[in-house]
Amino acid sequence: MVAKVLSAATCGVDAVPVEIEVNEGRGLLAVVIVGLPDTGVKESRDRVKTALENSGFKFPLGRTTINLAPADLKKEGPSFDLPMALGILTASGQLETQRLQDYYIVGELALNGAIRSVRGVLSIALEARRRGLKGVIVPEENAVEAAVVEGIEAIPVKNLRQTVEWLLGKTELLPQQVDLSNFFHNHHHDVDFSEVKGQQHVKRALEIAAAGGHNCLMVGPPGSGKSMLAKRLPTILPPLTLDEALETTKIHSIAGLLNDQNSFVRKRPFRAPHHTISDVGLVGGGADPSPGEISLAHHGVLFLDELPEFKRFVLEVMRQPLEEGKITISRAAGSMTFPAQIMLVAAMNPTPDGKSIQDSKSTPNEIRRYLSKISGPLLDRIDLHVEVSAVKISDLSQRSEPAESSAAVRQRVQQARQKQHERFSKIKKKLTCNAQMGARELRQFCLLDSHSEELLKNAMMDMNLSARAYDRILKVARTIADLADAESIHQDHLFEALQYRSLDRELFS
């Protein structure tokens, strides 16, 4: 008898259907798994056999063949344990039900029949809805993750025996329920902008970066507050929308970063990898491609502290993702695309010893080697360059009224983002902030009068800026105008945008 059970596998950040066909035949006792399984899937035969026997079921005594279709898709991990076990029970006549054709089923089996959590459940639930299935049968630990997908049932199961009894109608399992309306109301953060003393010009730059989704580089001596400011940037970003949260959670689910306490990404990610990270760790990849830090920061902030300490070739692989908002990893078996719509925030010292160029004891050649680790093309993809001065002792010891809170700044940022949403809703291209504008949108939404055009032209020549920097200046000026609730870009907006491009040419030339 041939039995068929529906399941799914993750490919990149999406899921693809997998049909598990089980045939019980004559011959010596053997279990053969075909369909391009990896080592983790091949080991399922022993887990499934032991789990079935320990759950009170009989394992077929003949030759059992399990086919994972489509055969040209590599199957990875232990998520097929549960559907394989159910297929064996159906093929051997111990389970007869039509429910198997209404659900995608995933789960890892323990030797005692308990069902353990697996990765990529959110992507599988989204695929089940797209295919018009009734729902998914998932481990209890993954139930909340699957339940955020509206329109399908997420059936939580604890063990193999309970799953079989529910499929036979002998026990009742209620679908997991999640109240999405409460997911994004809690914006509590452990840190706040009001805790930062002084540095008003840096706070202004970060407010502009948050309002337009711009990349930012902070240059200053150690102890000036660069890391402190960067860690507080997520507190002024707009809250995640449901679509953004689903996209981000899919990536974290595939990376195995979700758990019982954190089953859904509710806040914008903040990732701060160490400078010893490899290029694969940063952008993703490997023999079985998985998302890297830049994808895990999707719709959030990627903070690179001590930027020149990163290996230069590691930094250079970020150039394309910063420009396109996605990463394509190609292998002989095919290619995978991971999203990478991020805000890059970087921090660095002006010299190897951390002091200003005027006060540094490093030689000119040492300073040049230190700064040359950051290439011009990478700098051109960073919209704002900000000098962070050392904080004065008087600012630290002064007992004055608290500085402006993150909530107050976030309100202005949200108003500016709303103006951008209304502007971009008139075009077909899906954009969420000014930093994502292309050449066509720049011509449409960043028009300058004759005086402003002449000002920008002279500044480009005097500062020796590239054509890419020209576009970045226009985008930043458009964001400054949005914060000022101005319909068009004025000269004062352009002047402020230009000052955020002066530092890289002063320092790096």
Image (cartoon, rainbow, N blue to C red):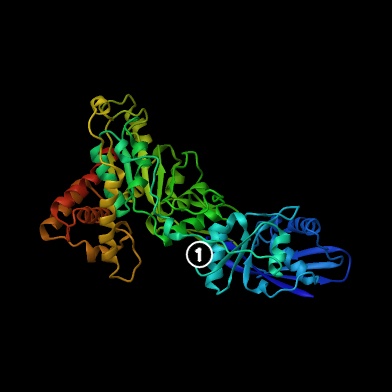
Q: How crowded is mark 1: few (under 14 residues within 10 Å), some or many (20 or more)?
A: many
Count of numbered labels shown in the rendering: 1
Q: Position of residue 247 (x, y in %)?
A: 46, 59
Residue extending farthest right = 28
Res. 46 visible in picture: yes
Res. 375 visible in picture: no
Q: In which quarter of the image is the N terminus?
A: bottom right
Q: Position of residue 221 (x, y in %)?
A: 32, 31
Residue designated by label 1: 149
Q: Nearer the viewer, residue 280 or 137?
A: 137
Q: Nearer the viewer, residue 236 or 434?
A: 236
Q: Nearer the viewer, residue 220 or 249?
A: 249
Residue drawn at x 37%, y 39% is 191
Q: Position of residue 416 (x, y in %)?
A: 25, 56
**Secondary structure of the residue carrying numbered label 1:** loop
Q: From the viewer's perspective, is 476 left or right of 303?
A: left
Q: Position of residue 472 (x, y in %)?
A: 27, 54
What's the amino acid at mark 1?
Val
Residue drawn at x 41%, y 42% is 304
Q: From the viewer's perspective, is 212 left or right of 448?
A: right
